[in-house]
Amino acid sequence: MGDVVTLSSATNAASCLAEASLGQALHGLVIKVGFMDTPSTSVANSLVTMYSNCGDSKAAENVFEEVYVHTDVVLWNAIIDGFAINRKILEAFELPHRMLQPESLNLTILLF
């Protein structure tokens, strides 16, 4: 069915191509194989990035809310970057207040 590396790589490809329908199909596969039950941060990062790059910041946020881990800085940076990409700057600046260690975020992603 697929492992973490395969699903992350395929989702990244959909992200680079801005192919939302392919990304949604891969998200369905992620759910089907159970990666949303025991979330893999690399798969979650790929999904958040893919939805953000496809212009669907709400879906990116839904993935983030479903699987986020308070200590995974990469995932936090991915959602903040996703908001910035989609011009949701206020939402991007509000997120660090929810994080336990906001000093480890890369807020330079908001400066574009």
Image (cartoon, rainbow, N blue to C red):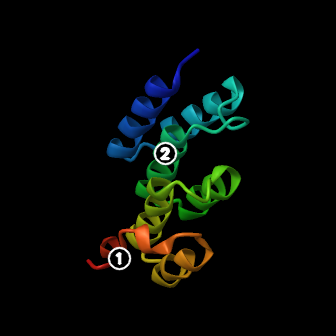
Determine crowd level at label 2: few under 14, some 14-19, many 20+ residues with C-alpha closer than 10 A. Answer: some
Q: Which residue is mark 2?
A: 20
Q: Vertical placement of 4 versus 76: above or below?
A: above
Q: Is residue 36 left or right of residue 25?
A: right
Q: Is residue 70 left or right of residue 88?
A: right
The residue at the point 35 percent across, 69 percent down is 106
Q: At which x and y percent is residue 101?
A: 52, 70
**How far apart are the alpha carbons under marks 2 and 1?**
24 Å
**Label 1's element?**
helix
**Label 2's element?**
helix
Q: Which residue is mark 1?
A: 110
The residue at the point 47 percent across, 58 percent down is 73
Q: Quadrant of the C terminus?
A: bottom left
- Nearer to the camera, 14 or 31: 31
Tag count? 2
Q: Is residue 51 left or right of residue 69?
A: left
Q: At which x and y percent is residue 34?
A: 70, 28
Is residue 52 among what the camera can see?
yes
Q: Nearer the viewer, mark 2 or mark 1?
A: 1
Q: Vertical placement of 99 versus 8: above or below?
A: below
Q: Which amino acid, mark 1? A: Leu
Task: Indicate which disc, 2 or 1, sits on the residue closer to the N terminus.
Answer: 2
Is residue 86 among what the camera can see?
no
Q: Quadrant of the N terminus?
A: top right
Q: Which amino acid, mark 2? A: Ala
